[in-house]
Image: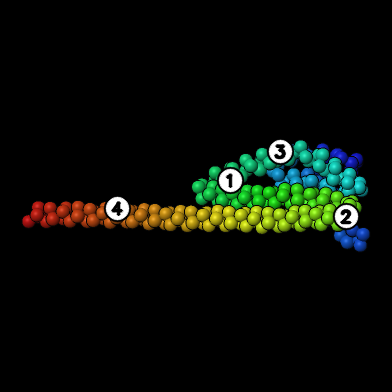
Amino acid sequence: MGDNGGNFGENVSEFQSNDSGEKDVPITFMPRGEYAGEEGLLQVLKQTVLQIVYPRDGTPFIRRAKQAFMENGPLVKQAATNSTKDLMDWTHRGGPWRAFLVISVGTIFLLATTGFGAFMLFFLAATTNTIIVGLLMSLAAVGGFMAIFFSCLVAIFVGALSVAAFVISVTTLVTITAVSIAAGWIGFFWLVWQGIKKSLDVTKSSFLMTASALSAISTNGSISKSNLKKNY
């Protein structure tokens, strides 16, 4: 097959053999030239995972991970742009209802991500402070008063972390619930409006058809009466 190390210019399909003698599983590595400009974010991430999990030449895990990130890292920006364009095209093809769905899901995901990120930042800060205080407490040998003082500081940090986690979680859940309820009501009223609009259109069409039929019957009746008068 030639050189297997780092040559992504050819479409290579390899087989991973098991030690137990089971049937080999084919693993296809996508050529870099094919997915560098057209594939989306999921394809690039999948390619990265495949390069890390399934070794091509028996290289160590750390080296495989480093090589995969170095090769696919510069492609993430273009892949994210392609995924965004695909999402926008898909939204435009679906009309206002699909756009409303995308906006609702995106808002909920953004709120959840923001809440999780805020909690993680506070968690890291509080954990770092707690570790530092615990280290100082373990190094303090100046008497029981300092030990009690540091213990109180640790308790304060743990309590603040618990309160922050509770507040952030409740706020995020309430906000997500409110957005979901609002989106549901908007969708419900939109469906009701569409139903009323369709009903009015059907009623209008029926009225026009009835009026046309009555007009045609009236016209035919007048013509028949005129013909009868002429005959007599």
| Sequence-wise first label, 3 or 1 | 3
Residue located at (89% from left, 41% from top): 5
| Sequence-wise first label, 4 or 1 | 1
Element type where label 1 sits in the image? helix
At label 2, the amino acid type is Gly
Q: Residue 90: give its label.
A: 1
Residue 76 percent coordinates (x, y): 73, 40
| Sequence-wise first label, 4 or 3 | 3
Q: Residue 77: give its label.
A: 3
Q: Quadrant of the N terminus?
A: top right
> What's the CA distance linking mark 4 and mark 2?
97 Å
Element type where label 2 sits in the image? loop
Quick check: 11 above or below 119? Answer: above
Q: Residue 208: give its label.
A: 4
Q: Residue 75: give its label.
A: none
Tell me if mark 2 has few (under 14), some (14-19) or many (20+) residues whose alpha carbon lies within 10 angstroms of its own: few
Q: Disc 3 vs disc 1: which is toward the camera?
A: 3
At label 1, the amino acid type is Trp
Q: Disc 1 vs disc 2: which is toward the camera?
A: 2
- According to the picture, the residue beneath numbered tag 2 turns out to be 143
- Image position of 82 (left or right of 24): left
